[in-house]
Amino acid sequence: MQYTFQVQGMTCGHCERAVVHAVRQVDTDALVKVDLATGQVIVESDKSREALANAIQEEGYKVAA
């Protein structure tokens, strides 16, 4: 499945790496694309949307509903 998340609080490369790392903690095979300018994170994963969103939020970023 492909999911698009609107993530608030990402401003730099460190933020991008933190979000990618968080997603890959849930699914090591996930494909993750981060667009800092728009705040979008696109994830291709077999895991649930909720599990992926929770992982991003646990890193300290807000995922819009």
Image (cartoon, grey):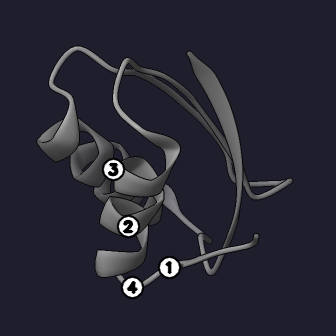
Between discs 4 and 3, the one toward the N terminus: 3
Residue 8 image-quadrant placement: bottom right
Between discs 3 and 1, the one toward the N terminus: 3
Q: Secondary structure at mark 1?
A: loop
Quadrant of the rendering where the C terminus is positioned: bottom right
Distance (Cα) linking label 4 and label 1: 4 Å
Distance (Cα) linking label 1 and label 2: 10 Å
Image coordinates for residue 16, horizontal then vertical, percent: 45, 53
Distance (Cα) linking label 3 and label 1: 12 Å
The disc placed on residue 54 is 2
Disc 4 and disc 1 in contact, CB within 8 angstroms: yes
Quadrant of the rendering where the N terminus is positioned: top right
- Label 4 neighbour load within 10 Å: few <14, some 14-19, many 20+: some
Q: Nearer the viewer, residue 54 or 32?
A: 54
Residue 26 appears in the figure: yes
Amino acid bearing label 4: Gly
Q: How many numbered badges does the structure rendering display?
A: 4
Q: Label 4, on which residue? A: 60
Circle nearer the viewer, 4 or 3: 4
Q: Label 3, on which residue? A: 17
Horizontal placement of 62 versus 27: left or right? right
The disc placed on residue 33 is none
Q: Label 1, on which residue? A: 61
Q: Secondary structure at mark 4?
A: loop
Which residue is located at x 34 percent, y 30 percent? Answer: 47
Horizontal placement of 48 versus 11: left or right? left
Disc 3 and disc 2 in contact, CB within 8 angstroms: no
Image coordinates for residue 5, horizontal then vertical, percent: 68, 50
Horizontal placement of 63 versus 17: left or right? right
Which residue is located at x 46 percent, y 55 percent? Answer: 50
Distance (Cα) linking label 4 and label 3: 13 Å
